[in-house]
Structures are given as C-alpha cells and as structure tokens.
Image: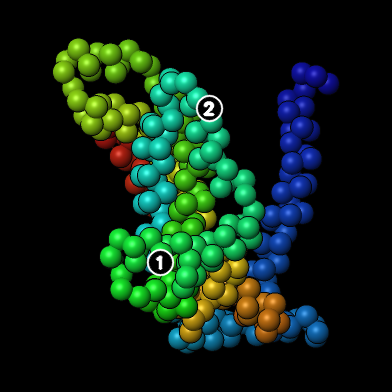
Amino acid sequence: MRNHPLTPFLFLIPGVIILGAFIFYPMLNAIWLSFTNYNIVTDAEFIGLENYKGLFADALFWKVLGQTLLYLVIVVPALVILPIFLAILVNQQVKGIGFFRSAYYVPVVTSMVVVGIAWKWVYADKGILNYILESLGLISEPVNWLTSTSTSIFAVMVVTIWKGLGYYMVIYLAGLQSISDDLYEAADIDGASKWKQIWHITIPLLMPSIMIVTIMSSISAMKVFEEIYVMTGGGPLNSSKTLVFYIYEEAFDKLQMGYASAAGVVLFIITLIFSVINIKFMSKKESAIKG
C-alpha cells in the first residue's frame, strides 16, 4: 500500500474536503445566486442576467469600482516598494535589531478594529496629526480627514499601508537573507555605491518575492473592508466606499443576496485578471533580468 501510486492522493483528501466545503462550494453557490432574486426570506428565483444588468446600470456601482481601482493604484505600489527599504534596514547585523523587527511587525498582528479606532483619534479635528501640521505651519486650520469627500479615502489608504508594511517586510527579509554576501563584497571591490548595489543586486534577486507581494497586496487592496467599516462607514457621501463594502451593504443591509453575489462575481473576475497580469508581467521582468 505504501508504494501504491494512489497513496499520495490519500493525503490530499482532507485538504480537498476542506477546500471544497469552505472555498469551492461557497464560490459556486455565489455564482448561482448571482442569477437569482434571493433575499433570504423567500426562495431563490432564477432571473438570468437581470442582476448584472442592474449592476452595470447602477451609478453607485461604477463609483465604488473606480474608488476600488484607485485604492489598488495607490496602495499596491506603496506596499511593494516601501517594505523593500524597510527590510534592507532591519537586515543589518547590529545590536538590538530584533526589537526593531518586532516593532515593525506589531501593526500586522494588531486588530484592525483597534488600529481603526487609534487612527480615528490621530485624524480627529483636534488630533495629533492636525496638531503637528498646525505647529509646523503647514495648515492654518484643522483638516477634516475622515469627514471630507476629498480626503477620506486617502486617509484610509494610509492606514492600510501602515498596517501592511511589516507583513510584506518579513517576506522581503526572507528573500534578502538568501542573497549571498559575496555579491555585495564583490560590488564593494568594484566601487559600486549602496544604491547601485540595491538596484543591480538586491532588486533583481528579490523579483520572486516582489511578484508574491504584488499579487498579495493587489488582492488585499481589492477586498479592503475593515478599515473603511471602522473609520468612515463608507462615507461621507460614499466617497470612501469600495466594492467589498458595497457588496456588504447590498447583502446584509438590503438583503439583496442575488444582487450582491453578482457584484461579488465581478470582483472575483477583476481580481483574477489583475493577478494574471501581475504574474505575466513579473515573470517577463524576472526573465529579462536573468537574461
């Protein structure tokens, strides 16, 4: 039995059962519900593409989709680039560096509810951010960071970036520790500056990690919810609402499960497209560097 060709597949059965119960079945059920009129109270009624027609005719849907893509465009580059320099910083062999690594990682393991409430205090009219900016003479009166339609979503983006830095830093740190010191020593002998070493040695050899971080941060940006729910509730005037928050409201506030499922399917397709594009782009980039 040990050498039977089907033996390895027996070890996959528990994982397949868990994936089927908690991933594949809910996903397929959501796709089916997207073609129905279902509000929990009554049985699902098949209505074809009506949910999708209503979705694409909804001005609010297009607004939150645009804001979701804006979130993606701003947050992802920040979470791809900034953790690289943070990882380089904490990769130094100096006394007490373990403390700084832990400190940078604390926001990652802190509850988003706690983080959201703390940052609401920071962003308050009389909060520390406005106090610092006024003290420096950068603003003449407090800025309504979370209650202004022009700043609310950007204020939440900062929180998303701040909380994610430590997580992606650890991924890069693992990649950095696999790079041989001999490469940097050879570059020093050739007179290469630190910036040239980062650009020509560190970045190319971190490409696999960069691809992982790009995909993970893209998915996280597309499904951002908790910080918006805690800090702004999607307001003011829907200015900080994203697609996942829109789905949540349609499903659990309005009980339009079929309509919300259609929006969820659209979100899945967009996320899948971005993931495929990221993989292809980063793979070509890695091949070009190796070539």
Find residue 56 and report its horizontal and vertical position in percent.
48, 82
The amino acid marked with disc number 1 is: Asn
Quarter of the image with the C terminus is: top left
Kindly tell me whether residue 248 is visible in this rendering: yes
Q: Earlier in the sequence, mark 2 or mark 1?
A: 2
Q: Quadrant of residue 13?
A: top right
Could you classify mark 1 by the number of other residues whose Cα lies within 10 Å: few (under 14), some (14-19), or many (20 or more)?
A: many
Find residue 168 and report its horizontal and vertical position in percent.
48, 41
Q: Residue at x 54, y 73 (%)?
A: 232
User: What's the coloring here?
Assistant: rainbow
Kindly tell me whether residue 265 is visible in this rendering: no
Find residue 238 and report its horizontal and vertical position in percent.
49, 80
The amino acid marked with disc number 2 is: Gly
| Viewer-nearest residue: 130 or 27 | 130
Residue at mark 1: 130
Q: Is 192 positioned to the left or the right of 180 in the image? A: left
Q: Secondary structure at mark 2?
A: helix
Which numbered circle lies on residue 98?
A: 2
Q: Residue at x 67, y 84 (%)?
A: 254
Q: Is 71 positioned to the left or the right of 17 in the image? A: left
Q: Secondary structure at mark 1?
A: helix
Quarter of the image with the N terminus is: top right
**Residue 219 versus residue 90 in the image, above or below:** below
Find residue 87 and report its horizontal and vertical position in percent.
42, 34
| Foreground label between 2 and 1 | 1
CA separation in Å, label 2 and label 1: 33 Å
